[in-house]
């Protein structure tokens, strides 16, 4: 992993930030992308690695032209991306489909599907050309099992699952690897975002449960990235012991 270039989207918090820490510790060079510039800078300062091993991008993955420009204008020493971690994603609302908010739908589709596609489309050709690379998509148990109120979010994560499988097939004959890491309940800002900043409601999601942490997920991502070059971990589903499915959770209140 020493000096390999790892591009992480949604790097300013949660699983993205945890990935930045574990890959930095292993000696990787990091391209960290997120919308929140101050949070990115705070993360960069906390990593305690040489400035020449980190490159920050204020980037909204939903903006295709911005993604194209960001990749095209990377300094020459940062262009050869070895690992792309498509982590940027979110959920908005928990409404029944017939009562859903159109803006929430657009934001989930634009971020979880289109943003992932944009990064993949602009980064993977270089991996193919160099005969080296690994795309790691962060999916969800929601891509395997739907739950009440999860309609569109589950649909976007099912799309991530299908895109990952399709990309693996399209890359057959190249050494570029594709992995989907699909967590269950992880305590991050996820629920605060879903409930539009309602902290109290967000806390109830994890009440009485010992959920996964961002570090737990980053550890699995790092494992997938560090297998021998002929080994591809296609898909990993991980959940806390207190969770048996998307809807079955052991709460001790």
Image (tube, rainbow, N blue to C red):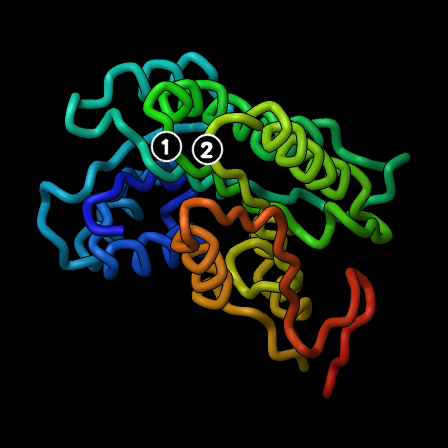
Q: Residue at x 58, y 43 (%)?
A: 90
Q: Is residue 26 above or below residue 102?
A: below
Q: Is residue 10 above or below residue 19?
A: above
Please tell me the numbered disc located at residue 176: 2
> Element type at marker 1?
loop
Q: How many marks?
A: 2
Q: Residue at x 24, y 55 (%)?
A: 24
71 sits to left or right of 78: right
96 sits to left or right of 54: right
User: Where does the image place residue 25, in percent across and percent down from the top left?
Assistant: 24, 61
* Label 2 Cα neighbours within 10 Å, binned few <14 / some 14-19 / many ≥20: many
User: Where does the image place residue 122, in percent across and percent down from the top left?
Assistant: 42, 19
Would you identify the image quadrant in which residue 80 lies? top left
Closest to the observer, 28 or 155? 28
Q: Residue at x 66, y 26 (%)?
A: 106
Q: Residue at x 71, y 31 (%)?
A: 105
Would you say residue 164 is visible in this rendering?
Answer: yes
Please tell me the numbered disc located at residue 132: 1
Please tell me the numbered disc located at residue 64: none
Q: Is residue 214 above or below residue 70?
A: below
**Which of disc 2 and disc 1 is earlier in sequence?**
1
User: Where does the image place residue 215, in percent across and percent down from the top left?
Assistant: 43, 66
Would you say residue 196 is visible in this rendering?
Answer: no
* Label 1 Cα neighbours within 10 Å, binned few <14 / some 14-19 / many ≥20: some
């Amino acid at each position: 992993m020493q000096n390999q270039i790892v591009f992480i989207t949604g790097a300013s918090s949660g699983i993205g930030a945890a990935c930045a820490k574990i890959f930095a510790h292993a000696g990787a060079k990091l391209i960290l992308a997120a919308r929140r510039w101050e949070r990115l800078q705070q993360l960069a300062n906390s990593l305690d690695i040489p400035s020449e091993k980190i490159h920050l991008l204020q980037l909204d993955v939903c903006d295709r032209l911005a993604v194209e420009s960001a990749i095209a204008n990377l300094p020459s020493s940062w262009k050869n991306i070895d690992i792309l971690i498509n982590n940027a994603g979110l959920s908005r609302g928990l409404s029944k489909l017939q009562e859903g908010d159109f803006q929430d739908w657009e934001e989930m589709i634009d971020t979880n599907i289109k943003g992932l596609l944009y990064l993949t489309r602009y980064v993977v050709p270089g991996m193919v050309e160099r005969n080296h690379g690994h795309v790691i998509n962060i999916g969800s148990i929601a891509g395997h099992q739907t739950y009440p109120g999860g309609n569109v979010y589950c649909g976007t994560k099912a799309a991530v699952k299908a895109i990952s499988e399709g990309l693996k097939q399209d890359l057959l004959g190249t050494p570029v690897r594709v992995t989907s890491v699909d967590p269950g309940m992880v305590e991050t800002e996820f629920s605060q975002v879903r409930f539009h900043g309602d902290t109290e409601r967000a806390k109830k999601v994890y009440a009485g449960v010992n959920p996964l942490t961002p570090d737990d997920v980053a550890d699995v991502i790092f494992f997938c990235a560090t297998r021998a070059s002929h080994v591809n971990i296609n898909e990993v589903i991980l959940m806390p012991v207190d969770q048996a499915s998307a809807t079955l959770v052991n709460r001790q209140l």
